[in-house]
Image: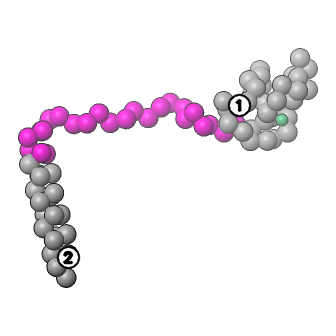
């Protein structure tokens, strides 16, 4: 039961410190991370075989992103 009281005191001190820091640092907010327009792990589907894979690993074609170069050639004839 002694530890419970100790934890309460520590939490109270931390809360007070946070309150003081909030007053001192008014107007100075930490920079919020801007959301990227497209996540690096965006999943695309191959138009030829409907396999889903990360866009970074996909082969870009005229009609979309393909799972492999061979599927891009089969789908686009090139
Ligand atoms: Zn495919």
Residue 57 in the magenta stretch? The answer is no
Q: Residue at x 13, y 67 (%)?
A: 9
Residue 65, by quadrant, is: top right
Where are the magenta residues, as a range? Answer: 21-44
Percent of width and height locating residue 49: 85, 39
Q: Residue furthest front?
A: 2
Quickly name the residue at label 1: 57
Q: Residue at x 89, y 17 (%)?
A: 78
Query: Across the whole image, how many numbered discs are drawn on residues?
Result: 2
Q: Secondary structure at mark 2?
A: helix
Residue 72 visible in image: no
The dot on residue 77 is: none
Quickly name the residue at label 2: 4
Q: CA distance from mark 2 to mark 1?
A: 52 Å
Check contact, mark 2 vs mark 1: CB within 8 A: no
Does residue 43 appear to the left or right of 40 in the view shown?
right
Residue 23, by quadrant, is: top left
Q: Secondary structure at mark 1?
A: helix
Q: Nearer the viewer, residue 15 or 64?
A: 15
Q: Is residue 26 above or below residue 76?
A: below
- Quadrant of the displayed image that contains ligand 1: top right
Q: Is residue 73 above or below residue 20?
A: above
Secondary structure predominantly adopted by residues drawn in magenta: loop
Colour mode of the rendering: one colour
Does residue 21 appear to the left or right of 38 in the view shown?
left
* Ligand 1 under 8 Å from disc 1 Cβ: no
Q: Residue at x 62, y 37 (%)?
A: 42
């Amino acid at each position: 039961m002694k530890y419970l009281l100790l934890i309460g005191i520590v939490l109270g001190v931390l809360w007070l410190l946070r309150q003081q820091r909030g007053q001192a640092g008014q107007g100075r907010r930490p920079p919020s991370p801007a959301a990227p327009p497209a996540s690096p792990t965006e999943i695309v589907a191959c138009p030829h075989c409907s396999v889903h894979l990360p866009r970074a690993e996909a082969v870009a074609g005229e009609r979309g992103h393909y799972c492999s170069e061979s599927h891009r050639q089969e789908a686009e004839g090139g």
